Amino acid sequence: MKKFIIFLLLLSMCGDTSTSEVEPIPESNEIIEDSSTTEQDSNIPPLPTVSFDIIEIYETKLGAELCSDATEIDSTTEECLRQYRDNLEFVFGYAEDLRIYMDNLNDYFANYPSAFTEEFRNLFAFVNEKFSTVPQNYGIVASKYQQRFGNSSSPSTTVSTTTPTSDNYLDYRDVKIFRASTISDQHIEILTKYIEYTEQLLFTDARVKRENLYPILVVQLDSENYASAIALEEEYCQYLNLEYQTTFNSTRCNPEYQDKKADGSIGLFTDGGRVSGSSISGTPSDRECCYLFISGSFDLSWDSRSQAYVTIHEMYHIFQLSNVVDFDYDLQQKITGKQIGSDNRDKPFWMEGYATYFSHLYYSRDINDFSHLENEMYGGMFSCYCGDNQPTIKERYLNGPELYNVTWESDWAVGYQVGAWFIAYLTNIHGEQTMYDFWINSQSGILFPENFQNTFGKDYVTYEKEFRNFIMNSSEDELMSILP
C-alpha cells in the first residue's frame, strides 16, 4: 500500500507515515544532492493551488469586518451579533475545500518533500491554531443569537401548502439547483447523480421524516470563475425574494444586511474577489426556508471523485439533521452527539465520523472499487497530517483524550478520522441497519447517551474503551479487516 508523509489538517482524510518504505527527510541544515535529486528538482510539477486565501479570508471576516464589540456576544447589538454569526459560518464554509486542498498537498509533499517551505509551515500552524476554533465559535455564537433574538423575525408571507402524506420521498422532493453560467455539464451530472444516489440510500425508509428533508437549494459554483458567482448571488436572491420572503429578509440578500462591494458581490457565494467553498450553510427553521448546499467545483480531469464523495458527505448531513430540525438548536447539539457532558464544547467524532465513513463506503460501492475506502481509512489511522515528523493520527488518539472528549480545537483530525474508524468498528459489529436506526431513533428527542445505550446495548464510554483497546492491540491487517 502506498505510504505518505503528510501534514495536519483538521478535517482531512489521511495517508500513511510508516517508515519502512519512506526515505527520511533531511534536517533543514542538511543538504543532500546527487544527480537523481537534481533531475527530480528540474522535473518537479507545479504545486496544487486553490482559488482562495484562507488566512486572508479569516483575518478579514473575523477581524476587519466585525463590529468592535462583536465578540461580546451577551451584550452586542443584534446586527453585530448576526454579522459575527454569518461571518463565522462563511469562514467555516471553506472547510471542505480546504481539506481537499490539503489532501492534494499531502500527496505532493510525499513525492517532493523539499518543496515544503516556511509558507506551508505557517499555513498548517494557522489551521491548527486559528481555523480550528471556527466551528466551536460558530456553534456558540449561533446558539447565543437564537437565544437572544430567535423570536424576532417577521412572520413568513409565503403561502403554506399541505404536506402530502406519503411513504415516497419523491412526493416531498424539492431540490432546486442554481448553476454557475460557466460550470460544465459534467459537474452538474456528477452533482445530480450523487444527490439522487444518496437520496435513494437514505431517504426511502418509511420511518424517515420526509417533510424535514426538503427544500434543498443547491448552488453549484465554478471555483475558477468569480464573475459567475456574483451573477449567481443575484439570481439566488431574486428567487428567495419571490419564493421565501422570510429567508430573504434574514440573510445577506436583504439590502439592509449587505456590504455590497464595488464589483457587485454581496459575500453570499463570494469573498474578497474569490469564490466560496462547499458547505451546508442552512437548515429549515423559523428563520430559514431550506437547506442551502453550496457546492464547490473540482478539476474533473483528475479529481472527479471529490465532486462525488463530497456530495454524499453533505447529503448525509441533511439526513442526520432532518431527524432533529424540529428541536431548538441547543437540544439538537445534545441529540446528535456534538455536545456531550456539561462543557458545551462541540465534539466532531459522531456526526462527522458517520458522514466521513459512509461517504467513502457509498462511493466505493457505486464505483465497485473498495480500494478507495481502504486507502482513505488507512490514511485516516496511520498518517500524520501534521508535518515535522509529528505523531500519526493513531498515536495522537491513543496518547490523547477519549474520542468523545476530542474537540475541534484539540485535534479536529482525530475527531474526523478516528470518528470514521469508530463508526466502521460499530458497523462491523452491529451492521449498517443499526447504524442507520440511531438517527431514526433521534426523532423522539432522546439525548445521545441514552440513544447510544439503547441502540448499541452499551454506553458510549464503555464502547469507546473497547474500541481504544482494539486500536491499541491490533495489527494493521487486523484493523483493516473490519472494513467491507
Image (cartoon, rainbow, N blue to C red):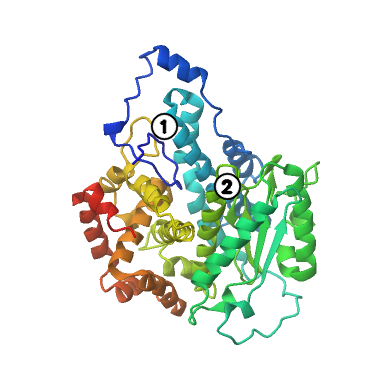
Q: Which of 59 and 204 is in front in this view?
A: 204
In this picture, residue 153 sits left or right of residue 298:
right
In this picture, residue 62 sits left or right of residue 235:
left
Under mark 1, the amino acid is: Ala
Q: Residue at x 71, y 39 (%)?
A: 273
Q: Label 1 neighbourhood size at 10 Å, few (<14), some (14-19), many (20+)?
A: many
Q: Which residue is drawn at 49% across and 82% down?
A: 206
Element class at badge 1: helix
Q: Which of 388 and 190 is in front in this view?
A: 190
For marks 2 and 1, give the one nearer the viewer.
Answer: 1
Q: In which quarter of the image is residue 50?
A: top right
Above or below for 57 versus 455 = above
- The image's mark for residue 94 is 2
Q: Which residue is drawn at 43% across and 29% down?
A: 111
Q: Residue at x 25, y 64 (%)?
A: 463
Query: What is the x, y in percent for residue 478?
Result: 23, 53
Q: Mark 1 points at which residue?
A: 110
Q: Nearer the viewer, residue 477 or 142?
A: 477
Q: Earlier in the sequence, mark 2 or mark 1?
A: 2
In this picture, residue 57 sits left or right of residue 133:
right
Query: What is the x, y in percent for residue 344?
Result: 42, 59
Q: Do callouts 2 and 1 mark residues in contact (Cβ within 8 Å)?
A: no
How far apart are the alpha carbons under marks 2 and 1?
A: 24 Å
Above or below for 337 versus 298 = below
- Residue 112 seen anywhere in this rendered image of the structure: yes
Above or below for 190 versus 450 = above
Q: In which quarter of the image is residue 239?
A: bottom right
Name the residue furthest bottom.
165
Under mark 2, the amino acid is: Tyr
